[in-house]
Image (cartoon, rainbow, N blue to C red):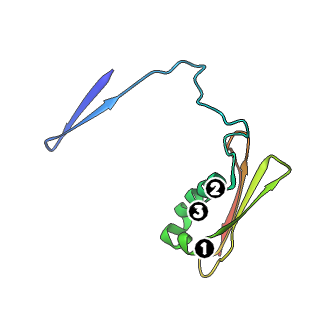
Amino acid sequence: MIHTIVAKEVHIERVCLRYPKYLGGVIHKRGRVPDQMIAARIAEAIWYSYYKDTIFLCRPYHVALIGDSIWVVKPTAYGNVGYGYVEINRQDGRIIRVIWGK
């Protein structure tokens, strides 16, 4: 099904596709969050909603795998940004815990 929206002479087409129920995407053999880089990017996306562009001053991040199932991500430099801490489930990508503050 294709919907066409006309707004100020700009045509935007939105395609609505229906996928089978069994199609859930490809899951890596090490889970949906297989490595440190992906865990750090997910945490950075969460922190961006709180700190905006100042979160980029806190790079690099300390990323550790706890018990082969939970990624823990913390910034190495806090500066005037504050404190951040994120726990991410390695197998399904769920956000377990987010702590932030100044």
Return the mark for residue 37. 2
Of tags 2 and 3, which is closer to the observer?
2
Q: Residue drawn 73% across and 46% down? A: 89
Q: Point out the tag, 1 or 3, that comes first from the N-terminus.
A: 3
Q: Which amino acid does label 2 sit on?
A: Met
Q: Point out the tag, 2 or 1, that comes first from the N-terminus.
A: 2
Quarter that holds the C terminus: bottom right
Residue 44 in the image: x percent, y percent? 58, 60
50 relative to 67 in the view: left or right: left
Kind of element beneath mark 3? helix
- Mark 1 highlights which residue? 58
**Residue 33 found in image quarter:** top right
Q: Point out the tag, 2 or 3, that comes first from the N-terminus.
A: 2
Q: Is residue 62 above or below residue 27?
A: below
24 relative to 71 in the view: left or right: left
- Mark 3 highlights which residue? 47
Q: Which amino acid does label 1 sit on?
A: Cys
| Residue projecting furthest to the bottom | 79
Q: Are marks 2 and 3 in contact (CB under 8 Å)?
A: no
| Residue projecting furthest to the right | 67
Q: 10 Å neighbourhood of mark 1: few (<14), some, or many (≥20)?
A: some
| Residue projecting furthest to the left | 9
Residue 51 in the image: x percent, y percent? 54, 69
Q: Residue drawn 30% across and 24% down? A: 2
